[in-house]
Amino acid sequence: MIELEGLTKRYGEKVAVNDLTCTVRPGIVTGFLGPNGAGKSTTMRMMLGLDRPSAGDVRIDGQHYDRLKDPLKCIGALLDAKAMHGGRSAFNHLLCLAQSNGIPRSRVHEVLDTVGLTAVAKKKAKGFSLGMGQRLGIAGALLGDPRILMFDEPVNGLDPEGIHWIRNLMKSLAAQGRTVFVSSHLMSEMALTADHLVVIGQGRLLADTSMADFIAQNSRSYVRVRTPQRERLLDVLHGAGITVVETGNGTLEVDGGKPERIGELAAQHQVVLHELSPQRASLEEAFMQLTAESVEYHAHTDAPPEQRWGDDWTRS
Amino acid sequence: MAATQVIRSEWTKIRSVASTVWTLSLAVVVTVALGMLISALSNNDFDHMSRNDRLSFDPTFISFAGMSLGQLAMIVFGVLVVSNEYSTGMIRTSLAAVPQRGVFLFSKIAVAGGLALAVGLATSFVTFFGGQAMLGSHRAAIGDSGVLRAVIGGGLYMTLIAVFSMGVATMLRSPMLSLGILMPFFFLISNILGNVSATKKVGRYLPDQAGSKIMRVVTPIDDDTPYGPWGGFAIMALWVVAALAGGYLLLKKRDA
């Protein structure tokens, strides 16, 4: 369990993390979301005792990080895949970490095997691809068999197979009862992995909720209807007291309506339907809606605001 | 967190990168080869020297002449041991594994300093005997008064140069900046300050000027240096302590 209490980090005038309070619980994957520059990495560095908070507190299983005896046995972290000496072999990189925390040498072989790097264990890390570096970083996080795991943007640079692998890894770690905290700016990725979400924007906590609630609260659901008898259906629905939004391309969007009710009404009045489909906003849309005002780095283009923001965010 | 664990870890770190081997071997080769060369040249030149120079002739110190260049390799060793952590980003991984920053820094310095001491002492003995072999009839013997102290002192001097560089690199973090300051300082600036009469009084308190006194057996004529071999060594040690204290305080205070 990780507890943040009023965590704040200021760099001069600029507030990178602002009064963040939340608890990361064991047994589930908690996604840590926010647009670029929202303060995710700063928060994670403070969790590991690397950056000193300007105010507030972080506790790892009730203790301050620098009070942990052999911290790698308690919390393992992947911060940056390139945070290693490129001239050192993968094996020696892990060995020096293991020795500093009194972890046996045999465990190094085990984690190399887990991440699939046994064949290149004696190779220097600078020859590794981004994906291999990422795997080595994950091996380092797993080294002490810790009860808490933290991954900062773990899928960066991984190929689809690697992404699939890490997704399953995180889920299985959580299923073993461990605390798994993973940051990403990739919504679609989070939607497939996380059970719980902590969302920040400009350093402030925007949401701390389950994935399902987050989508339900922050997005709109509606039923999309297409019909050749548009005027007639509008009259029927109006008559039944249902609000309809007309969109430009000939489809109708019925807010809060049940598809069964609309279908029954149409049948009753003999209106032909070409489409009747319930629509649920994706996590991506929900996230964009929530953080629309707290995006720090806007891209300035002539595209409409929501579109512009989303583009910026998925590509980066 | 036991310090012995961290020391083992730092030993693995230092033995598993190529820069350790090439900086230390360069220090040995340059110091020994240049020392022997200058000893041979001095031997040939002895008969043409002035009376004062002959009276001040210090065969032990002459065999250490290669250290002026060899110490630069020791500086590179000391700087890289520390600043590699920063330039590669390894520092974050290291400090996450060992959050007690004092334990981290001083374990690293104990390991690197110990290695520098072993290499420095070996270099000093080899360069002494190699140099004396070139000096023919002008040579000194290891049993002569003050000679053993000077030879061990040569190893200690190389160690302190390396440890001082580690302290400076901890403060500055960047390898380029650290080397850019230390190399010209020890190769040029300190020598100039120590030999120009106007700045000599200040220059002789610089770490290398004071520390190298321990490698002298014969005091030059007209020498008015206010400290002896161990006094000079103590001055150098104070510089090293100051550099380490500065490095430690900054490391403790800074965000990694």
Image: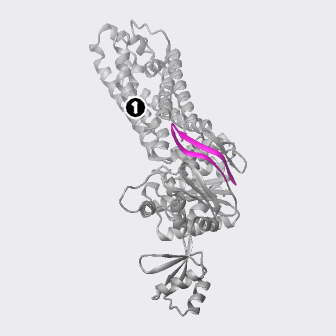
Instruction: Check disc 1: other Cα within 10 Å, few if <14, some if 14-19, many if 20+.
Output: many
Q: Is residue A21 above or below residue A313?
A: above
**Quadrant location of the C terminus of chain A?**
bottom left
- Residue B124 locus on image (x, y percent): 46, 29
Looking at the image, residue A229 sits to the left or right of residue A278; the answer is left
- Residue where numbered disc 1 is placed: B72
Q: Chain of mark 1?
A: B
- Residue A269 locus on image (x, y percent): 56, 92
Question: Viewer-proximal residue, B230 or A48?
Answer: A48
Write the start and end of the magenta stretch as one range. Answer: A1-22
Amino acid bearing label 1: Leu
Q: Secondary structure at mark 1?
A: helix
Q: Find out whether residue A12 is within the magenta segment.
A: yes
Q: Find out whether residue A174 is within the magenta segment.
A: no
Question: Viewer-proximal residue, A152 or A87?
Answer: A152
- Residue B145 locus on image (x, y percent): 50, 15
Question: Viewer-proximal residue, A26 or B159?
Answer: A26
Q: Is residue A141 above or below residue B128?
A: below
Which quadrant would residue B225 be assigned to in this image? top left
Q: In terms of secondary structure, what is the magenta stretch mainly?
A: strand
- Residue B232 appears in the figure: yes
Question: Viewer-proximal residue, B195 or A111?
Answer: A111
Q: Which residue: 50% across, 89% down?
A: A273
Which quadrant would residue B53 be assigned to in this image? top left
**Quadrant location of the N terminus of chain A?**
bottom right
- Residue A194 appears in the figure: no
Which quadrant would residue A307 be assigned to in this image? bottom left
- The residue at the far right in this view is A62
Looking at the image, residue A10 sits to the left or right of residue B74; the answer is right
Q: Which residue: 52% across, 84% down?
A: A235
- Residue A134 locus on image (x, y percent): 51, 59
